[in-house]
Image (spheres, coloured by chain):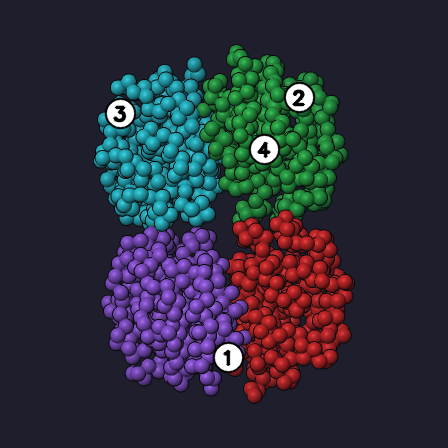
Chain colours: A green, B cyan, C red, D purple
Amino acid sequence: MENYQRIIEEIYSDLKSIEDTGKVANYIPELGSISADNFGINITTIDTKSFGIGNYKDKFSIQSISKILCLTLAYKLEGEKLWERIDVEPSGNPFNSLLQLESDCGKPRNPFINAGAIVVCDILISHLKSPKENFLSFCRDISNNTTLHYSEKVAKSEKKTGFRNVALCNFIKSFDNIKNNVDEVLDFYFHICSLEMSCKELSQIFLFLTDDNFRNHKGDRILTMAQAKRVNAIMLTCGFYDESGEFAFRVGLPGKSGVGGGIVAIHPDKYCIAVWSPKLNKKGNSYKGMLFLEKFTTKTASSIF
Amino acid sequence: MENYQRIIEEIYSDLKSIEDTGKVANYIPELGSISADNFGINITTIDTKSFGIGNYKDKFSIQSISKILCLTLAYKLEGEKLWERIDVEPSGNPFNSLLQLESDCGKPRNPFINAGAIVVCDILISHLKSPKENFLSFCRDISNNTTLHYSEKVAKSEKKTGFRNVALCNFIKSFDNIKNNVDEVLDFYFHICSLEMSCKELSQIFLFLTDDNFRNHKGDRILTMAQAKRVNAIMLTCGFYDESGEFAFRVGLPGKSGVGGGIVAIHPDKYCIAVWSPKLNKKGNSYKGMLFLEKFTTKTASSIF
Amino acid sequence: MENYQRIIEEIYSDLKSIEDTGKVANYIPELGSISADNFGINITTIDTKSFGIGNYKDKFSIQSISKILCLTLAYKLEGEKLWERIDVEPSGNPFNSLLQLESDCGKPRNPFINAGAIVVCDILISHLKSPKENFLSFCRDISNNTTLHYSEKVAKSEKKTGFRNVALCNFIKSFDNIKNNVDEVLDFYFHICSLEMSCKELSQIFLFLTDDNFRNHKGDRILTMAQAKRVNAIMLTCGFYDESGEFAFRVGLPGKSGVGGGIVAIHPDKYCIAVWSPKLNKKGNSYKGMLFLEKFTTKTASSIF
Amino acid sequence: MENYQRIIEEIYSDLKSIEDTGKVANYIPELGSISADNFGINITTIDTKSFGIGNYKDKFSIQSISKILCLTLAYKLEGEKLWERIDVEPSGNPFNSLLQLESDCGKPRNPFINAGAIVVCDILISHLKSPKENFLSFCRDISNNTTLHYSEKVAKSEKKTGFRNVALCNFIKSFDNIKNNVDEVLDFYFHICSLEMSCKELSQIFLFLTDDNFRNHKGDRILTMAQAKRVNAIMLTCGFYDESGEFAFRVGLPGKSGVGGGIVAIHPDKYCIAVWSPKLNKKGNSYKGMLFLEKFTTKTASSIF
C-alpha cells in the first residue's frame, strides 16, 4: 500500500501557500461568507483506512457533489428506465446552460448538470413519501453517519437567488419532463444542494463506488456492480461541466465538484479522495482542488488510464 | 488470464446473425462498396498474446481511428504546447460540426473531431519533411509492420466529396489556427484517414497505450507514461463524438471509432481490442461493434470503472 | 380612395372556404376552445372610415398584438433609455426561444418576442402605481373605448401552463434585467396578453401608428412622430418572429400577429387593417390572415416598398 | 420637391469633422489602403435629378452592395423558384456566420449574407454562358454606364484571404445547395464583390428599385413591380446583417451596406441615395454613413414608416 499520509502531507504543504487565482463562489450569498483559506484533504481506502490533513474534519456545503447521491438513489429506484428522461453525454457547456435543452427537447444531457439533477429530483419525488427526509435517511444509511443534515440557511439563500434554476425547471416542465409541482421540485433540489459534509465524511460516503463488494452497516448493497461502474463512467465524462475533459486529462479519475469548493474522486478498487478549497477557477471548479488531485495521481501513478 | 478466445467466440456467435439496424457509411463513395457482412474481432494482450475471430485478418479503412496515431506523433513532437491549439473537451456535437468552432474562435474542442485532427495534421506538416512518408514510417515503426499503407483510392474518393472537411479547414484557417497551405493539409488529412489495417493489426499497433513499458522493435518508447494516459483519457471523453458518454457508460473503456466500421478499445495494463462491422448507428459508430464491446467488458468484468 | 369594402369582400369570399392547413393554438387551453371557422377583417382609414366583413365585430384574445400597446406605453414613459434594456433586432428564432438570451446576457433581441415583452412589463411596473388598471386605462384612452377588458379566464389559463414564460422571466432575472418580483411581472404579462378586442377595435386602436397627427379623444398625442415611425420599423423587422422577413416580403407592411389568430398591419398615412382567423401556420402566425393581407396589398398596390 | 442639395450639404458639413470611432476594413488587404477621410453623398430622384457633395464622383469598392444586383439578375432569370434555395429571413447573426447554415441544412437565411449571395452566384452560373461578362453587361445596361468594371486587384486580394467564404461555399456544397464547381462559384463571387462605383453611379443604378415604371435606356424593365418591392423588403429586413433592425429603426429605409464603406438606401417613389465613408462600426457598416442617413430621413421626414 502507498504511504498515503505522507503523500497528501507533502502535496498539502506544497500547495498550502501558492497563489490561488480562483474566486469564492458568491452567487449564493451564504457561500460567499466562507473563508477562502480552508484547505482540507481526506482519503479513505477500500479497506476503510482513512488519512486526512488540513481542514479535513470541517463540514462545508457539498453543493453539486450531492448530485451523485441523488442519482444513486434514483438509479436504485428506477433502474435503466431512468435514462429515458436523462442522457449520459457530456454537454460541452457550463453547468447551468439552457442552450442544449432547447435543441434536445427538454431531455438534459446528463444527471450532473443542474438540468439533469433537477429531473432526477423530480423522479425521486414521484417515488418517495417524504422526499427530503427519505433522501437524508438514505445518505445516513450509506455512511452510517447520523450527523448528516441539510443547511436550511443555504437552502433558503439559494431559493432566494436561484433564478437560473427556477428557469431551468420551468423550461423542462414546458417540455413535460418534470412531472411534479415546480416549487416542490426546486425546494427539494435546493435542500439536496445544501447538504454539509467534511472531506472525511465525503471520502467515506462514496466508498460504495470504489468497492465492488460494498455493503452498508445494515448489510445492504447500494447499487449493483454494473450500476456503480456506470455512475463512475458518467462522473468521468460529465463530472466537471465543460472542464470534464480537462479533469480526465490531468487527473485521470472519475470525480465530481461542487461550487462550495469540494471535489470527490474515485479510484475503483483502491480509494475515494475528497479535497476542499473554496476558491473556484473560471469553470466553477476548485482551483487548488484540481491541482492537488493532479499531483496526487501523478505521485501515486493511480490514474485509471 | 481470462479465456479470451472462448469469450470472443461466444459473443461473436451471439451477434453474428442479429438484425443490424445500422447503415454502411456512403458519404465516401469508396466505403459504400464494402460488404456489410464483415465482422471481425481481435484482442492482443499486454503480453502480446493475440486472439481473433471472423474477418479479423482483413484490412479495412480505419478512417478516424488513425486520429489516435496522428495525435500520438504530434504529441511526441510538440509536447504540451500542442494544447494551445486544440482543447481536450468533449464537444457534445457531431463529428463534423462547425458550430462550436465559431464560438471557440477556431480552437477545436478535441483532437478526435475532424476539426481537431485537421489542426493536428497542420502541426505535423510544420514538423515533417515528407509528411505522408514520415507519418507512414512512424506507424510502421510502432507496429513493426511494413505492410501498412494508404489507400490512394479512398483518399481520392474523400477528396472529391469531402466538402465539409474543406469547409472546416478553411474556417479554421480564417481564425489563423492553420499555418500551412489548406490544400496540403487536406491532402495529408485525407491520406491519414485512408490508412488500412485489419483488426489484428489495430489491436497490435495500439499496445503502446496499454503497456506502460512499451517499446517498439527498435527499443524506442512512443510516448511517456503520462502522455499515454492522457491520450487514453481523451479517447474516453471524446472518442465517439456525441456518443462518447454512451460508450463510457456501456463499455467503460477508452476507445475510438471510424466510419469504416472499426472500433479500437484499450484496457490499460490488460489488452487492446479491435472490432470491425461496417454498419453504423445514427451517431456514426459501428452498431455491432459497440454491442460486442459492451458484452465483452461485461463478461470479462473489465470496465476501467 | 380605394373601394376598400369591395376589395375586402372579394378577398374574403375567395378565402372563406379554402383548405386551411393551419392549427388552432392549444398550448393555452382556453384558446383551444375557439371555433376555427371565425374569419373577420376590418380596415380603418386615416380619416377614420371603417369597413368590415365576417366576424369583424367579435372580440377575441389578441395575445401578442398587445405587445405593441405595452411597448407604446413604455416608450412614452421611458423614452430612448428603453433601448438600454431591449434591442431592436430580429431574432431569427421562434417567439419563446431562450437560446439567444444566453449569448446576449439577458438583453432580449426586441420587444416583440416574449422575452422582450416581459422586460417591457417589468419596466411598466416600475413606472405605474396599479399596473394592470393603469395599462387598461391607457388602452381605453387611446381608442376611446371603455369596453376593453382583460379575460381573467385566459390570464389564469396561461398562468397555469405558461412554464416557458416563467422560465424566460427567471432566466432574464438571473441576468438582472428584471427589477421587480418575478410573479408580479408574469401576472401583469399574462393579463396584457389576455386583452380581448374585435378586428374593428384593433384597426381603430392602432390608428396612432398610421396618422402622424393622431390625437386621442382627450386631445393627447400618444407618441411623437419619430417614435411612432420607430415602432412601425420594429413591427416590420420583428413582428412575426422568425417569419418577419416572409411577412415583409409577401405583404410589405409593418404588422404584428398573436397566437389567438389575429394580425394587425399598418400602412403609414393610409390605414390600419386587422384580420382574424384562428388557425396558425407552423411559425405561429394566422395562416389565412397572412394570405388575406398578401392579397390585399397586392390588389391595392399598397405595400410600403 | 425638397431642397436636397442644401440638406445634404448641411449634414455633410455637420459630420465632416466629427470623431469617427469606426475602423477601415482591413481583412481584404486591398481595402485597407483606402484613405479614411473619403466622404461622399449622392442622391438621385425618381425624376433623375442628381445632387452630390464631397467625394461623390470617386469610385470605390462597392463590395456587398453588389449583392442587390446579383439578386436582381437571379430573380429575373429564376423567378419565385429562387426562394427554394434561399430564404428571406433576417439571420440575427454576423454577415459571415456559419452557425445557422448547420441547423438550416445549407439553405441560407437570405440573399444578403455571404452564404446567400454565394448561392445566388451559383444560380447565375447555371444560367449564364460567360457569368462574369454577362453580369457586367447586365449592370452596364441598367445604368447605361459602360465604365463599370471589376477590380481584378481587389478580387485577387479577396481570393487570397477569403478563407471564411471558401468555408461557406464548401459547407453549402456539402448540403448540395451549390451545383457548380466551388472554385468557379467563388471566383465569380469575388469578382462581383470587387465592382467599383461612385456614389453618383450607385444612386443611379438602383433607380429601378425606386421607380415602379423604370425602364433602362433600351426600354427594358429590370424587375416587375412586385419583384422590385420584394427586393426592397429584403433589403429592409436583411440589408445590414445583425444591425438590420437598427437601420430600419434609425433610418427607416430599405438599404444595403458594403465593407468598402458604402451604403445605398431606397425611398420607393422618391429617391435613391448613396453614401460613402470607409470607417466601419463594430457590425461592419459605415459609421458616418448610417449617421448621415439617419439625419437625412429625419430632416426630410422621409422614413417609409
Q: At x 24% / y 41%, what residue is drawn?
A: B153
Q: Secondary structure at mark 3?
A: helix
In the image, what residue type sits under mark 3?
Answer: Asp
Chain bearing mark 2: A
- For badge 4, the amino acid type reads Lys
Tell me where residue D191 sits by quadrant: bottom left
Q: What residue is shown at x 28% (from left), y 43% (from top)? A: B180
**Amino acid type for the residue under numbered disc 2:** Lys
Where does label 4 land, which residue? Answer: A279
Residue that extends furthest to the front in the rendered view of this protein: D17
Residue B141, numbered label: 3
Mark 3, other Cα within 10 Å: few <14 / some 14–19 / many ≥20: some
Residue at 61% x, 82% y is C46
Q: How far is disc 3 from disc 1 in space, using C-alphas?
A: 78 Å
Answer with left or right where residue B134 lies relative to residue A101.
left
Left or right of residue C237, residue A131 in this image? right
Taking the image as drawn, is residue D122 in sight?
no
Mark identifier at residue D11: none
